[in-house]
Amino acid sequence: MRFYVIKKQNLFLIVILAIVVASASLWFLRTPEAETVVTPDTGEKMREIHLVTGEFKAVTEAGKEIESYRWDPGVIFLEKDEKVALNIYGINGMEHPFEIEGTDIRGTVKKGEETIVPVQFKEEGVYRLICTIHHDKNSNGPMIAYIVVD
Ligand SMILES: [Cu+2]
């Protein structure tokens, strides 16, 4: 009888341990709202670059409505190591979840709201700011801006 009780306690401990391990891995796997390549210190002076979300719409000769969401401007230029705040204002489209390819930077731009994304690139190159739900012409895109770091 006593053996049975100890077994039950062990089971309880194992369950507790499993919960702790699972929540710890979740914490490590979580995606931050808008992490930067290198996080510039807050309160520091950063150059601001303003973007908006726009939309092109047309009707084909066959009467089909076609549209494309866009980041405007579609190309921005940054210096390597420069601290920049991307201020993205949502105009067209309810919501644009985005990522900057090759980085951990993620976020969402919502209609009528400004999303501020601090960035600092350590490597030169052309990075793509991509709306993950309008990434190509078949999903009302391609909503891609090119960040030229040089
Ligand atoms: Cu979008």
Image (spheres, helix red, strand yellow):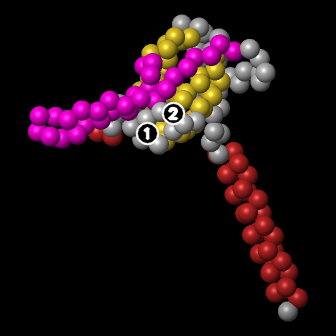
Q: Which mark is residue 93?
A: 1
Local secondary structure at mark 2? loop
Is 31 in front, or is 26?
31
Q: Residue 130's quadrant in the figure?
A: top left
Direction from residue 63 to residue 30 in the image, left or right: right
In the rendered structure, does residue 15 fall within the stretch colored magenta? no
Answer whether labels 1 and 2 touch (C-beta < 8 Å).
Answer: yes
Q: Mark 2 is on which residue type?
A: Gly
On screen, 21 above or below 99?
below
Residue at image location 65% in from the left, 39% down from the top? 32
Q: Mark 1 is on which residue type?
A: Gly
Provide residue 14's location: percent of width, then percent of height.
Answer: 76, 68
Magenta range: 46-74
Ligand 1 neighbours mark 2 (CB distance < 8 Å): no
Is 17 in front, or is 59?
59
Residue at image location 77% in from the left, 24% down from the top? 42
Q: Residue furthest bottom?
A: 1
- Assign the magenta stretch its main secondary structure: strand
Q: Residue furthest right?
A: 2
In the rendered structure, does residue 50 fall within the stretch colored magenta? yes
